[in-house]
Image (cartoon, rainbow, N blue to C red):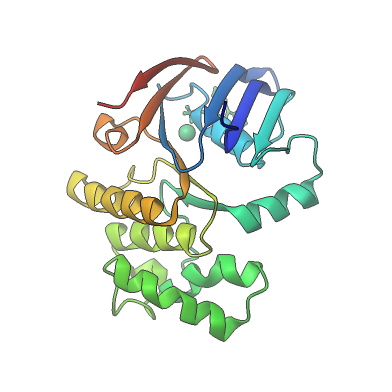
């Protein structure tokens, strides 16, 4: 069997008395785009955070690129996130006071790339995502669709092994959401990026190679993408 790029095995996690994950299993192959679906509160975001090493499970294992990561300390897990993961969130979560260009450059700056070089590396992303001319705009002044494309550029600029996207089109109208998904999938395919995408929209999940359903803190069923 091919070793998974990223895998959760029997993952359990509670927030105080609230169980969020009750034994979740998921394996994602390298280069695969997987949509994680399921009702609100079922544990989708918590699963994503465990896979990314942001949260550590109470029980079970997380493997990333063949390495067990749930047993690592916070410093090592944050280094792994910095070096190998990209993130796109529902509302973009840009730093509003920074320009679009500075927001996109952030992952590179955090990885120790010099400022001029980091900013220069953002340029192709502005072209690729149809954001030309918006480089110096404060991100607080961008439209929702523009901000989400900037967030996508920021998620991809460091060419991560795995892109985690938690409801990346949740704040967008359906046309803009489709544009963002087209760009996300095209960029991921081009770079061979593995993508774990949380969504409750079937229209968004249709872009994935495979769907999984989270219910009551477990990965309940698998279905081939239509
Ligand atoms: P989903 O993303 O599918 O909507 P979540 O993973 O966010 O679900 O949440 C799963 C369960 O864990 C829910 O009952 C939610 O209320 C709870 N939960 C999530 N995050 C926290 C938190 N930081 N503190 C307390 N409870 C949380
Ligand atoms: Mg969520």
Q: Can I make out residue 99 in this image?
A: no
- Please state the horizontal and vertical placement of residue 165, each as a whole percent of the image: 45, 44
The residue lying furthest to the left in this view is 175
Horizontal arrangement in the rendering, residue 169 relative to residue 16 (left or right): left
Which quadrant of the figure has residue 71?
Answer: top right
> Which one is in front, 147 or 149?
149
The residue lying furthest to the front in this view is 1
Q: Is residue 83 above or below residue 61?
A: below
Q: Is residue 76 above or below residue 205?
A: below
Q: Quadrant of ligand 1?
A: top right
Horizontal arrangement in the rendering, residue 203 relative to residue 109 (left or right): left
Which quadrant of the figure has residue 65?
Answer: top right
Quadrant location of the C terminus in the rendered image: top left
Which quadrant of the figure has residue 125?
Answer: bottom left
- Please state the horizontal and vertical placement of residue 44, each as a whole percent of the image: 49, 29
Task: Identify which residue is drawn at 41% across, 50% down.
Answer: 91
Task: Identify which residue is drawn at 45% across, 48% down.
Answer: 89
- Please state the horizontal and vertical placement of residue 126, each as a whole percent of the image: 34, 72
Please count the marks in the image: 0
Quadrant location of the N terminus in the rendered image: top right
Task: Identify which residue is drawn at 46% across, 43% down.
Answer: 31
- Please state the horizontal and vertical placement of residue 61, each as a whole percent of the image: 71, 27
Q: Can I make out residue 215 in this image?
A: yes
Q: Is residue 200 above or below residue 79?
A: above
Task: Identify which residue is drawn at 65% across, 67% down.
Answer: 111
């Amino acid at each position: 069997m091919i070793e998974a790029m990223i895998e959760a095995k029997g993952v359990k996690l509670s927030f105080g008395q609230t169980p969020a994950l009750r034994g979740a299993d998921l394996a994602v192959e390298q280069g695969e785009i997987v949509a994680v679906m399921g009702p609100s509160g079922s544990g989708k975001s918590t699963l994503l955070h465990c896979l990314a090493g942001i949260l550590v499970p109470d029980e079970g294992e997380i493997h990333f690129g063949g390495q067990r990561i749930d047993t690592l300390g916070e410093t090592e897990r944050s280094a792994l996130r910095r070096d190998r993961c990209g993130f796109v969130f529902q509302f973009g979560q840009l730093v509003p006071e920074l320009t679009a260009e500075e927001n996109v450059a952030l992952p590179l700056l955090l990885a120790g790339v010099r400022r001029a070089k980091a900013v220069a590396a953002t340029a192709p992303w502005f072209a690729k995502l149809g954001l030309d001319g918006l480089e110096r705009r404060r991100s607080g002044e961008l439209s929702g669709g523009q901000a989400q494309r900037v967030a996508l550029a920021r998620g991809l600029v460091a060419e991560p092994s795995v892109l985690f996207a938690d409801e990346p089109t949740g704040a967008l109208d359906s046309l803009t959401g489709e544009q963002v998904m087209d760009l996300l999938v095209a960029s991921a395919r081009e770079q061979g990026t593995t993508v774990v995408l949380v969504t409750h929209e079937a229209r968004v999940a249709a872009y994935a190679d495979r769907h999984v359903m989270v219910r009551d803190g477990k990965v309940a069923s698998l279905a081939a993408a239509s």
